[in-house]
Image (spheres, rainbow, N blue to C red):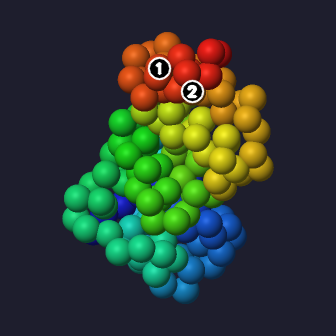
Amino acid sequence: MHLVTLKTAIFLTGLSRRTLWRRIATGAIAKKNKDEPLGRTQVALEGLMDDIGMSLSEEDMDLIRQADNGDPLAQGELGLMLLQAGQPERALHWLEQAAKREDPDAMHWLGRCYIRGEGVEADESLGLSWLTRAAARGHVISQRQVAELGV
């Protein structure tokens, strides 16, 4: 069984905390009381598969657990996986988490989402800001785009 925090379950499925707790109460989703040492409620990832909206391999589930544990590279990869699955609203959370932790690839993709209005209202200024930050951290594609735009 792969366990993730309730917060991650919310961001993966788009379900509300209340809906998840109802499903836990009915036994539709397995719950582990609290993980140590952080004391967070965890649920079985397998019970969320229908709500995630895409099939997940064992490797994908490991990636989700790493993202849940705060690994910025895994968070960025999860964001990209959700973007590719046509779920940009859900992807944004993970890209933002990774970008806040200085992941240049996540910054690049977050910038693209804002510029294109994928999963969020288009905001070219904010998008260019993220691209510029990614470029400053060595993201080659962002560096080229920023140079071409003269930003």
Q: Residue at x 22, y 65 (%)?
A: 58
Residue 69's disc is none
Q: Amino acid at mark 1?
A: Gln
The residue identified by callout 2 is 131
Q: Position of residue 55 (x, y in %)?
A: 35, 75
Between 66 and 134, the residue placed more toward the observer is 134
Q: How many marks?
A: 2
Indicate the secondary structure of the residue bearing disc 1: helix
Q: Amino acid at mark 2?
A: Leu
Is residue 56 placed above or below 7 in the rendered structure? below
* Mark closer to the observer (1, 2): 1
101 left or right of 46 in image: right
The answer to whether residue 35 of the structure is visible from this angle is: no
Q: Residue at x 64, y 16 (%)?
A: 151
Q: Position of residue 150 (x, y in %)?
A: 62, 15
The quarter of the picture where the N terminus appears is: bottom left
Q: Residues within 10 Å of mark 1 (few under 14, many from 20)?
A: many
Q: CA distance from mark 1 to mark 2?
A: 8 Å
Q: Residues within 10 Å of mark 2 (few under 14, many from 20)?
A: many
Between 78 and 128, the residue placed more toward the observer is 128
Between 9 and 88, the residue placed more toward the observer is 88
The answer to whether residue 32 of the structure is visible from this angle is: yes
Q: Residue at x 58, y 41 (%)?
A: 112
The residue identified by callout 1 is 143
Give the residue furthest to the front: 148
**Upstream in the sequence, badge 1 or badge 2?**
2
Quarter of the image holding residue 37?
top left
Q: Position of residue 49 (x, y in %)?
A: 42, 76
Q: Position of residue 54 (x, y in %)?
A: 42, 74
